[in-house]
Image (cartoon, grey):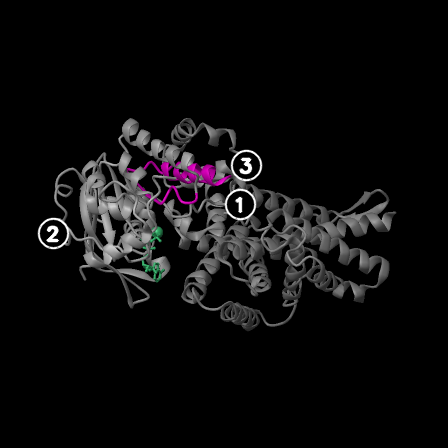
Amino acid sequence: MTNEPTPVAAGDAHLRSAESAAAGSSPAGTTGPGTLLTIDNIEVIYDEVILVLRGMSLGVAEGKIVALLGSNGAGKSTTLKAVSGLLPSEQGEIASGRITFAGEDITRLDPADRVRRGLSLCMEGRHIFGHLTVAENLQAGGYTASAKEDRLDFVYEFFPKLADMRSRTAGFLSGGEQQMLAIGRALMANPKLLMLDEPSLGLAPLLVEEIFSTIARLNAETGLTVLVVEQNAQTALSVAHHGYIMERGRIMLDDEAGALSQNPDVKEFYLGIGAGDKKKSYRDVKHYKRRKRWL
Amino acid sequence: MSTFVSLFIYGLSEGAILALAALGFVLIYKATGVINFAQGEFLLIGAYTFYTAFVILRLPIVVAALVGVVAAVIIGVLVERFILRPMVGQSHISIIMVTIGLAGLLSALVQMFFGTQPRSMPPLFPRNQLEILGAHIPANRLWVLLVAGIVLTLLTLFFQRSKHGIAMRAVADDQQAAMTVGISVRRVFALSWALAAVSALIAGILLADVTTVEMNLVNFGLLVFPVVILGGLDSVPGTIVGGLTIGLISQFVAGYLDPGLAEVAPYIVLVLILLVRPYGVFGEKRIERV
Ligand SMILES: Nc1ncnc2c1ncn2[C@@H]1O[C@H](COP(=O)(O)OP(=O)(O)OP(=O)(O)O)[C@@H](O)[C@H]1O
Ligand SMILES: [Mg+2]
């Protein structure tokens, strides 16, 4: 359990760094040519009053794995919902800013059209179709795809376990199997960018490793671009190329993944490793944070 | 024995029609969560549309049936688009009230155009008497059973196997997840209403062939409720078994006990089911571990 991050109370960690001053506009190194997804300074409001994203910007370069980290309630899931067009189904809206995918403005596009253009989301909590079989879940995943049979072969090859369980009712699979199915279902649409919202949620450490090595393999073998939201910062940064740290609805810090996992603030708040490499108690961290509070 | 056989066949044919009408109700409930109190009126509208095309406009039977299907699809889609969609997010009670209002509107429209006189339709199927195990059965009863059986089988296959059937079940399961795989929830809603109207149309035509075209068809539509409660509201096979069961029960009660009692027997079943097994005999057990 040593690499578990120290628990951080919601909205309690506020990082300040040189980079974060510039983070409001467009983060360096990740926009421009070769950028598949650009989130440009968006504001998201729920129920017409709750402002959740305040000038959120982020870029995902083609062929890379990008990790989006942050404490509970920072707005990570909201960011992914904004990109996949799910906000209207939750009384949320993008009040300002722009989202560009493969060079086209998709800010107000219908969710189905986004899937057709190659954007797939695996929601937090898996959300598999519990009453459908494994095979039917995958068929539903290929709803927009043209070469469905090829995709099915590909997914079964990638997750041989799913092939063995194809006629089982999905709701009765274990958590790890359901996560595999959720990823397989998203892959059925033949995405260019796969977005994963906390794929490790509720899984045992060994399974978490398995999920992330699957993500790394997908990226290495097929060139799939991945944007992954995670609480499990260390594991996520170990496979990611680039990482973003989000607090209170905006990006506070972003860097190349290796550098980010060496960053003292990140170590302290997300990886649970103190300055002297000894694990600090939650109380100490909280105290220290109070001094570093910047708002 | 011959009484038993004829009651059995009458019960099955009526039950199959009932299952068709109820299937429409279940499709809507399953995919959209709406309890459609206007399903009986869909049946009525279907029967009168077909009557208009076939008897008044003298179109050939196949063309008349196609006209009926097109009209049913249009009515289903319009109802979804302009009556139900604006109600998304409203309470269950308001939505039920809206479908009750819709039921009133549809039956008033039929009365306005056609009056309350029963209309007779030329027979759609041969009516020669067949002898089966000593019982004399008019052939059209068997035809009705055959057609209803084929349509029920096709609808079930559509639901279980086809891309759009799976999409409908996916939406019934988890709307947001369905959106993430690119299924248009609106289109699935429209499709459910259209299919419900078409299955009601076919039920209406078959029923009109064994009875007459009249306002009373609505009362038959009310029998949808005992059927779906018995079948568990969200199960397609359950609805079919429920329809056949209710059809058989009312025929046997009418034949062996009392025709008056047969009118209420389905509702007695309804109350008993609600007391004993509220999720029906075939209702999906909710999977909680998701
Ligand atoms: N549908 C909604 N309506 C109103 N407020 C919402 C809605 N969804 C999220 N929020 C609020 O927006 C904020 C950000 O939520 P979000 O789910 O994006 O956070 P998160 O970073 O994914 O957190 P977690 O790590 O806990 O999943 C929270 O304060 C939450 O209460
Ligand atoms: Mg979240």
Q: Is residue A194 covered in magenta?
A: yes
Host chain of mark 1:
A
The label shown at residue A214 is none
Q: Secondary structure at mark 1?
A: loop
Nearest to the observer: residue A238 or residue B225: A238
Q: Nearer the viewer, mark 3 or mark 2?
A: 2
Q: Residue at x 63, y 65 (%)?
A: B218
Q: Residue at x 28, y 57 (%)?
A: A12
Question: Would you name the residue on which mark 1 appears?
Answer: A131
Question: Would you name the residue on which mark 3 appears?
Answer: A168
The x and y percentages for residue B41 are 57, 64
Q: Earlier in the sequence, mark 3 or mark 1?
A: 1
Disc 3 crowd, CA 10 A, few/some/many (<14, 14-19, 20+): some
Q: Is residue B262 left or right of residue A111?
A: right
Q: Earlier in the sequence, mark 3 or mark 2?
A: 2
Question: Would you name the residue on which mark 2 appears?
Answer: A22
- Dots 3 and 2 on the same chain: yes
Q: Secondary structure at mark 3?
A: loop
Q: Is residue B190 covered in magenta?
A: no
Host chain of mark 3:
A
Q: Residue at x 53, y 58 (%)?
A: B57
